[in-house]
Amino acid sequence: MQLLRPSLGIAMYFVCAGVSAGETLRSPGGQIEVMLLTEAGHPTYSVNLNGEPIIAKSALGLKPDAAANLEVAEITRSSGDETWKPVWGSYSEIRDHYNEVRLKVEGPSAQTIICRAYDDGIAIRYQLPASGRFSDEFYAHEATEVALVSEKPTAWFPLSQVLVSDAVDLNTWEPGDGKISKNVRQESKPARIRTPFTVKLSDQACISVHEAAVVHSDEDGLSLNGNTLTVLSNMKTAGGSVTPWRTIQIAQKPGGLIASSLLVNLNKPCELEDPSWIKPGVTLWDWRVHGAHADDGFVYGLNTESYIRFIDFAAETGVEYLMLDAEWYGPERDAKSDPKTAIPDIDIEKICAHARAKGVGIWLYVNTKALAKYDLDETFAVYKKWGVVGIKHGFLGGGSRTKNEFSHAVAKKCAEYHILYVVHESEKPSGVERTWPNILSYEYVNSMLDSATRPSATPSRVINNLFVFGLAGPVDRSCGMYDLDSTFIP
């Protein structure tokens, strides 16, 4: 991946043990200011935007036990400034420009607190020493907090993996409020809130709390007590490892959150030597068409002729791809269903050959059971032979460290075979698509636009999705019926 205008500066100094350490870290443009302080053995931070406080003094650090008693032993300052070219996305170039401070703290829970300030937000992570208290794997809880400074904080956040709340006044949200989103009943504040957690603090300040570079870790969550968010993280870590970045995107107006590149900047550069084969595009989808009657009397189903018709339509209308969804290789949850073969009514090689001749790429759905059971090299070698361009990984059920690592292993293996990747029932997007740009999207959203058990796709709810799930990364919505107030929805 080409990098332009790289620069890096480092300065290091030591402090006397036992002395409270106060450090101020500013973003390159100066509008964001982070104050880091260690008092009575407890590290904290606070944040100003354009000279006004937006986050009050909040706790930092990992806490494997209740006693912190940490003392700053070493402070390292650095900065970075480089411009990189993403393979796809909204920008042709992205500037990775930040100032950083590392606080090496000693005590019963020795660790290094790393804080970066960008012009579009801040990021915090923790690095463990290679030896000593953290030399063996253990489960570390976090102390990280975000104490909101606002007279009337208004928040939008996930109610589940796929549903987003309506606007919630955090000052008045109490147990028993009942419905806070149409058709979704929330009788009390959830014990664990997923992220992104987006808050309008004032007419001049908006933030969104999330995380970046979540690969070898469980995803985090948040608890809410008054106006203070606390990161809920119970990670299995080991000496020398680092946590994911805890991120706070910051902007004066909501649109500034959409424009932020904070999450991708906090991930590793592209691992692919030549990613030129990666081409995002529009995809036709067969799932909602089974049983449909065409004007000439043809009935669509799981068969070769139906897919030939799809391909012809895609070629005529300039649609780049066609997705063959579940059941093309048999019942997706049946352990005997082999994703390297197709059911008798589907001639997969004929379909792929016809698509190739028409300039249409074929995507295949594969359930996570099949991806886990069958050797990935064998499966993807078959797909490469057929000419398949991408897979949709179904029912990952992401969120745990195991699922996160498996998803990224599948994405990496896909890249080896020049196969694009979309994951459903996914892990939390966290900017990893910079490292593996063949990851095109995640179903981290209410996928279906119509459902008897989910809210209607009203214009306001679509916008809410953009400022919550959409801030995490590229999300995958599946078009259905467009009746915004369907009578079958209670």
Image (spheres, helix red, strand yellow):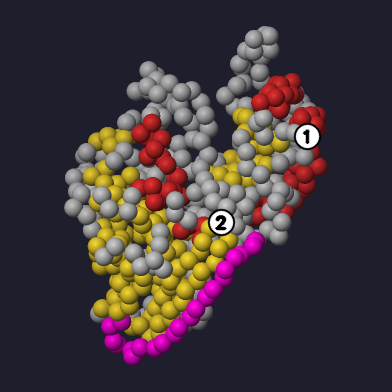
Q: Is residue 258 above or below residue 362?
A: below
Spatial separation of the CA atoms under disc 1 and disc 2: 32 Å
Q: Position of residue 445 (x, y in %)?
A: 46, 40
**Towards the viewer: 44 or 8:** 8
Between 258 and 423, the residue placed more toward the observer is: 258
Q: Is residue 52 left or right of residue 322?
A: left
In primary-sequence order, the first of circles 1 and 2 is 2
Q: Quadrant of the C terminus?
A: top left
Residue of label 2: 93
* Residue at the spot 51% in from the left edge and 64% down from the top edge: 96
Q: Dot 1: few (<14), some (14–19), or many (≥20) neighbours within 10 Å?
A: some
Query: Which residue does the numbered mark 1 point to in the structure image?
Result: 356
Q: Which residues are magenta?
A: 1-21
Q: Amino acid at mark 1?
A: Arg
In magenta stretch: residue 10: yes
Other-residue count near label 2 (Cα within 10 Å), few / some / many at <14 / 14–19 / ≥20 = some
Across and down, in percent, residue 314 comes to 68, 27
Q: Is residue 423 visible?
A: yes
